[in-house]
């Protein structure tokens, strides 16, 4: 079966911003027609209002449009052809942990998915998560070195011959400087300071090129490494859950596919709206008892994490 997964919250900054929250949600369509019905209704709403996929997000719609979306969701959940599970992560736990942001995400996501897919011999998981490796600290560590190479010949040849267009240079410099300044407010490293000094003083103009290629390289390599780590964690958690129930048949693989909300995927969009409802009403419900939000909320199985 297919499980559609999304999250709400600035989880990359949760340990630094106590007011933030992290909510993860998984949605299961129990038959193909259930998915097609929701997809049809979502497409009709977008067509009626001439909305692009980018505009069809929980945080982008006004109340009138959200009510139409919520009506579709509530009917689907009430029919028992669609199920939703969620976890609300305790912000105090995130504040105290010393784990990396990616590891935090993988831990909670794989834990939730294993609980709902443990009895499935062939789980297919579709996730909106965009793992990144190109954080300013890691990029600066590479870009600060004038001898930086990726050791991937094709890419290194391009980097050697590449020169940023003059009319784009000012914008590139401003963009990199903003990333560094934002990162330096949270944590300072000698490499970030060094790269920013190079940019501000103009002492090494090639640092802009190195920064761009280091960012590209890390996003490529670290993203793929994180995705494989995520898949392995889900498989490991599912196998552990099955063994704890005395299930002797092992599963050898988990299908994990990454899908952007903007690809018009109704399952990911459903999970996005679901996450937003739970996120907005954490820790206390803010909607009225008879509202569609409340009805949807009550139909979702929500796990609360406690210290």
Image (cartoon, helix red, strand yellow):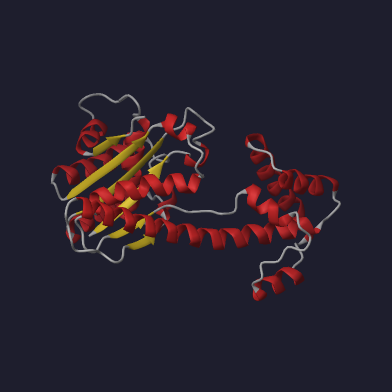
Q: Position of residue 2 (x, y in %)?
A: 26, 58
Q: Position of residue 247 (x, y in %)?
A: 17, 57
| Residue 139 vertical position relative to residue 186 in the rendered view, above or below | below
Q: Position of residue 197 (x, y in %)?
A: 80, 45
Front-most of 161 and 198? 198
The quarter of the rendered structure image containing the C terminus is top left
Q: State the image quarter where residue 200 is shown.
A: top right
Front-most of 102 and 74? 102
- Left or right: residue 73 versus residue 162 is left
Q: How many marks?
A: 0
What residue is at 21 percent from the left and 63 percent from the top?
121
Q: State the image quarter where residue 178 is shown.
A: top right
Front-most of 41 and 299? 299
The quarter of the rendered structure image containing the N terminus is bottom left
What residue is at 76 percent from the left and 57 percent from the top?
145
What residue is at 26 percent from the left and 43 percent from the top?
85
- Left or right: residue 199 versus residue 2 is right
Q: Residue furthest left?
A: 79
| Residue 265 visible in the snapshot | no
| Residue 247 vertical position relative to residue 107 in the rendered view, above or below | below
- Left or right: residue 161 versus residue 51 is right
| Residue 111 visible in the snapshot | yes
Q: Position of residue 160 (x, y in %)?
A: 75, 70
| Residue 102 vertical position relative to residue 292 in the rendered view, above or below | below
| Residue 178 vertical position relative to residue 222 in the rendered view, above or below | above
């Amino acid at each position: 079966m297919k499980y559609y997964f999304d999250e709400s919250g600035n989880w990359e900054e949760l340990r630094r911003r106590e007011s933030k929250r992290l909510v993860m949600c998984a949605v299961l369509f129990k038959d193909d027609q259930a998915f097609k019905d929701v997809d049809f209704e979502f497409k009709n709403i977008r067509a009626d209002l001439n909305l692009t996929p980018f505009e069809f997000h929980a945080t982008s719609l006004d109340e009138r449009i959200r009510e139409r979306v919520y009506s579709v969701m509530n009917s689907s959940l009430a029919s028992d052809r669609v199920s939703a599970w969620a976890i609300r992560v305790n912000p105090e736990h995130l504040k105290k942990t010393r784990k990396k942001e990616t590891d935090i995400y993988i831990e909670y996501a794989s834990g939730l998915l294993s609980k709902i897919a443990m009895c499935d011999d062939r789980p297919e998981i579709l996730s909106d998560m965009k793992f990144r490796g190109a954080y300013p600290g890691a990029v600066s560590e590479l870009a600060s070195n004038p001898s930086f190479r990726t050791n991937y010949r094709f890419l290194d040849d391009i980097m050697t011959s590449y020169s940023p267009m003059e009319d784009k240079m000012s914008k590139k410099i401003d963009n990199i400087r903003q990333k560094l300044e934002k990162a330096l407010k949270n944590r300072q490293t000698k490499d970030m300071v060094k790269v920013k000094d190079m940019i501000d003083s103009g002492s090494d103009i090639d640092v802009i090129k190195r920064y761009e290629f280091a960012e590209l390289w890390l996003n490529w390599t670290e993203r793929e490494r994180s995705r494989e780590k995520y898949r392995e964690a889900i498989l490991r958690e599912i196998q552990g859950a099955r063994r704890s129930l005395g299930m002797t048949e092992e599963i050898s693989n988990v299908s994990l596919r990454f899908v952007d909300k903007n690809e018009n995927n109704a399952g990911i969009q459903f999970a996005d709206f679901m996450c937003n409802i739970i996120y907005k009403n954490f820790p206390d419900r803010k909607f009225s008892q008879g509202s569609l939000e409340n009805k949807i909320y009550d139909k979702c199985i929500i796990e609360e994490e406690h210290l």
